[in-house]
Image (cartoon, grey):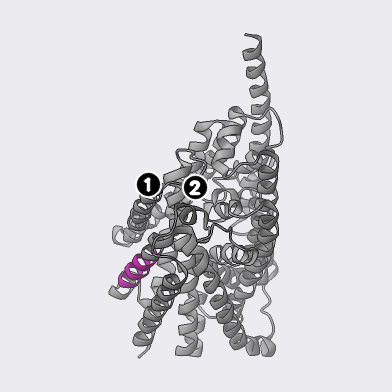
Amino acid sequence: MALILTWTLLFGYGFFLYQLVQKTTPDRVSASSFFHGESATGQAPSLWLLVSSAAISWIFAKSIDNAASLAQSFGITGGIGYGIYYLSFITAAIAIFYIRNRWGFHSLPEFLVHKYGAWCAKFFLIAIAIRLFNEVWSNTKVFSLYFGAEGSWGYWLAALLVTAFTVYYSLWGGLRSSLLTDGMQMLFAAILLVIILATLIPGFATQGLPVVDAETNRAGLTFCGLAFVQIFSYPFHDPVLTDRAFITSPKTMLRGFILAGLVSGAFILLFSGVGLYALSLGVEGKATLAVPKLFGLPLLLVFNAIMLTSAGSTLDSTFSSVAKLTARDWSNRQGKPEESEARFGRWAMIAIAILGNLPLLGIYLGDKVGPAIILATTISGTMVMGLAPIFLLAFIPNAGKWSFNFSFWIGLSLGVLRVVESASALNIFPDWIAMGAGKYALDLGINVYGLILCTLGFLLGTLCDRTFSQKKVHS
């Protein structure tokens, strides 16, 4: 019965979204609607459509799962730490508002080409392409586990059906379809969250919030510190977020992103209560799978639905960002989009839907090889720490290609070394770099010192850029 209801929920979700897209999106959307989310009459998305779309697009299935797991590991500081990442909305809003108001650019790649050069923009786009690739498998993996154990027929069939259906309606309307479905998905996710909290609150009222030992609390605070350091670079390598920063007026974007950050951050913090509940009862295993089993089939279906909703909203946003990156950003195309670009973007969606799920096959490569491949394809917050000075210090007049490269490659190198260390028995970083306590102490130290190095590298590059520009003038 449970399996039948789970699959019924999946097909009901698909039918509902199909009806929504069919009724709200014309049979043939314009290229501007496909890439910029404009309505059939050419109007930009409203404030609240922007808020709901940006918020739900960052409430990934993977993020929901992570928030619960961190709270289960560290207590309330784990949930707070993951919620801190949602301050990234404010970082992005302020930086992009400045970029748009001062220079009038229409995308981050356009800004990078004019400020740092075409090659620098290409390096940036490769980094975010890997991020988009990672978003596909990481989200399909989380919700597919509700349909069967990893590698089972239910697991693979769920991954196939949801990916195929999301590609279908994304091909239909691009970013416009993503925005419209995001609005309903945000509302649906909020209702489901209320149901979950209403189920868990009586337990908290009886037992109170779980208390962790001092060392675990220190480890949770260390993670909070890591999250805070990374919010200065993290948002810029996520085109799902930054693409939405250019589809409305700058003032609407600024208000919308601040509101979206508050909404999505609060959602994640509240959902981390699932992990706290698991911790208070001593439940073993993944909190998002173990807790609903304690309450039976109804809550399991609610969890299934919220994971399905969050994964679907992230997948369609990922597909629309891939279309824009390949068809317009890579060639730095500006002005009104053309239908040929939309066609190319649709083929790119199909390609990433297939390629992006291939890491799931890593389970057949063994306990060590499979996870190592997945880890190696992940662009972490550490790897992109060099983006912070590139965007936040963009106001420095002489900053150019040397500034970009000295910052970008220092951050990327440190991130790659950290991934290699995590995937092997090598001890690359000395113990004195670690800050705080627990499993994230080394990451916090690498990010703090790394951000300082990237900033110094950026400033040194600025001196080089000014020197070379002066030589060109004199010559």
The residue tagged 2 is: 128
SS of the residue at dot 1?
A: helix
Left or right, 147 with respect to 135, comes to left
Which amino acid lies under the numbered mark 2 shown in the image of this protein?
Ile
What secondary structure is the magenta-colored segment mainly?
helix
Q: Is residue 50 above or below residue 403?
A: below
Q: Nearer the viewer, mark 2 or mark 1?
A: 1
At horizontal 57% and vertical 37% (from top left) the residue drawn is 112
Left-right relation of 425 to 187: left
Q: Nearer the viewer, residue 156 or 412?
A: 156
Residue in view at x 54 percent, y 78 percent: 188
- Please provide the residue range marked out in magenta: 156-166
User: Which is more toward the observer, 43 or 95?
Assistant: 43
First in residue order: circle 2 vs circle 1 = 2
Give 60 or 203, whichever is nearer the viewer. Answer: 60
Q: Quadrant of the C terminus?
A: top right
How far is mark 2 from mark 1, CA to CA?
A: 23 Å
Q: Is 217 on the left-hand or right-hand side of 387?
A: right
Q: Position of residue 83 (x, y in %)?
A: 65, 65
* Residue 340, numbered circle: 1
| Residue 39 in the figure: left or right of residue 464 | left
Q: Please give the name of the residue rendered at 55% of the width and 76% of the height, measured from the top-left corner.
A: 189
SS for callout 2:
helix
Seen in the picture, residue 231 relative to 8 is either above or below; the reply is: above
Label 2 crowd (10 A; few <14 / some 14-19 / many >=20): many
Give residue 360's position: percent from left, percent from top: 35, 61
